[in-house]
Image (cartoon, rainbow, N blue to C red):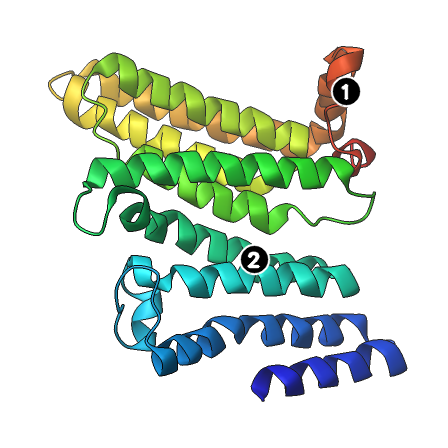
Amino acid sequence: MYAVSFWLAGRTLWDRNRLVIPGGLLFTMAVCMTPLAVYGLERIFNMWPVEDPGVYRGFHEWVRGGWLMMEAATIVAGLSALRYRRFPFLTAPIAFALWYMSMDLTPLVFGADDYSWQNREWVSVMFGLAMLLTAYLVDLRGKVGEDFAFWGYLFGLMAFWGGLSIMDSGTELSKLGYAFVNVKLIALSVLLRQRSFIVFGSMGLLGYIGHLSYRVFQDSLLFPMVLTMIGLAVIYLGVLYQRHHGAFEAFVRDSLPDFARELVPARARASY
């Protein structure tokens, strides 16, 4: 009844009063009722994909395979709503459910009791990559002035970067590879015009530099001075970029070969 009420109110604001944003928010609230409705049905009929996950409030607290049907239904409901209402924020509950699914899918793939944290990490990384690729394809097909990919990028990064960051890399070479991945995320933020990439990439680089400071160069007197200079240089480069970001982005755009320019979404090309 909550979902129906939200949808009817949203339709009234959207169609009759031309209030697109509040109407779209109400549509999103209707979609967000989906996991609770599905949980109620599963509880009534005692039908769970893996095991009984417990009380509903645990949906946001515990990683369990029993939530999987609720997440899948939320994705279907969100996609159905998008078919009738082109409102970018409707992608938020879809991406949120996919992010939860990236964690809850592991017990279903490896068995309820036959999996490790390493399995969780790899499922999260691969699922996050799939989400990022899907968001990119949506972005590539999108129109100028519309951003239906933001939430897919954000939660895809949370799954991919989160799984990658908690992995036990073991060797210094693999840790360097992790830093390189974060550098690529920062570069992608410029090409795709998505600030979430630079946020996660910067946090990853900060973690790697912290590792160098506390582990590799812990007995070095010179490294803290070098680290200070690097920090000041980053701040200076940030100021330069803020002042001349238009020229810098134009240089990046003009440096791309023709085939690579076609791989940049129209939304991002229009903002250069």
Position in image of residue 118 (x %, y %): 23, 35
The circle on residue 261 is: 1
Q: Is residue 254 left or right of residue 148?
A: right
Residue at 18%, 21% in the rendered image: 170
- Which label belongs to residue 148? none
Q: Position of residue 32 (x, y in %)?
A: 54, 71
Q: Quadrant of the C terminus?
A: top right
Residue at 65 percent across and 84 percent down: it is 4
Q: Nearer the viewer, residue 74 or 151?
A: 74
Chain-order first, disc 2 or disc 1: 2
Q: Is residue 152 found left or right of 127 in the rendered image?
A: right
The amino acid marked with disc number 1 is Arg
Where, by quadrant of the figure, is residue 56 drawn?
bottom left
Q: Amino acid at mark 2?
A: Ile
Q: Is residue 31 above or below residue 218?
A: below
Element marked by disc 2: helix
Q: Which of the two discs, 2 and 1, sits closer to the camera?
A: 2
Q: Is residue 85 visible?
A: no
Image x and y of residue 192, in percent: 66, 33
Residue beneath disc 2:
94
